Amino acid sequence: MKTGVKFYRFEDALSIKKSRFYPYKASKRVGFKHEFYLGVGGNLGDTRLIFDRFFKKFRSDKRFHIVKSSPLLLNKAFGFKDQPDFLNAVILAQTSLSPKATLKVTAHFERIFKRKRSFKNAPRTLDLDILWHSAKTLPRDKRLILPHPGVMSRVSVIVPFGLM
């Protein structure tokens, strides 16, 4: 049976790394309406340092509460392959924001960390993808598809999820 889902080879997962905030675990907090999973990726600059700085900024934003994060996965690039390997992680967070409002905030974080969108699958300092959000969502639009189309097919998501 053909499902249309392409699975990447687990050989693309090169190694597991840790940093100050990856992995991380805290208790859930009362007062937030939703939970969501955020994919974190990047391959330009000191990615581990960028991830730690992002984590601290994200954690200090009162609209969010980080419940846990995965260890970091070093993996091969896909799509455009002539670029450095990626670091990836997954964060489980709480919020009361809608998925679209969460997307606006994550896009703002990408801009803070100098994300450039030069072409599809281009190298990047910080890539934030909402993988899943507990709030009901409107029909798909081109900027936000939930769950994220890569959740079931990318080693860069599957392995960090499994390590949480």
Image (cartoon, grey):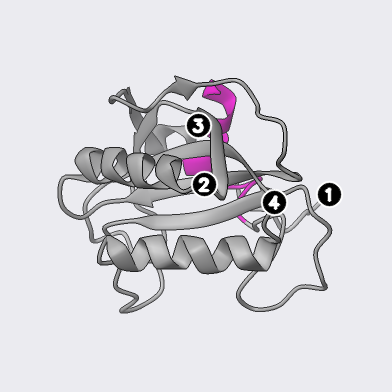
Q: Are marks 1 and 4 in contact (CB under 8 Å)?
A: no
Question: How far separated are the C-alphas under marks 1 and 4?
Answer: 40 Å
Comparing 84 with 90, the one in front is 90
Q: Is residue 159 magenta?
A: yes
> Residue 98: x, y in percent?
71, 61
Q: Amino acid at mark 2?
A: Lys
Main SS of residues in magenta:
helix
Question: How far separated are the C-alphas under marks 2 and 4?
Answer: 10 Å
Task: Report the magenta residues as a range.
Answer: 150-164
Label 2 crowd bin: few (<14), some (14–19), many (20+), radius 10 Å: few
Q: State the mark number for residue 160.
A: 3
Q: Residue at 68%, 61% (x, y): give it.
A: 99
Residue 131 visible in the picture = yes
Question: How far separated are the C-alphas under marks 2 and 1?
Answer: 46 Å
Q: Amino acid at mark 1?
A: Met
Mark 3 or 2, closer to the camera: 2
Residue furthest out toward the left: 45
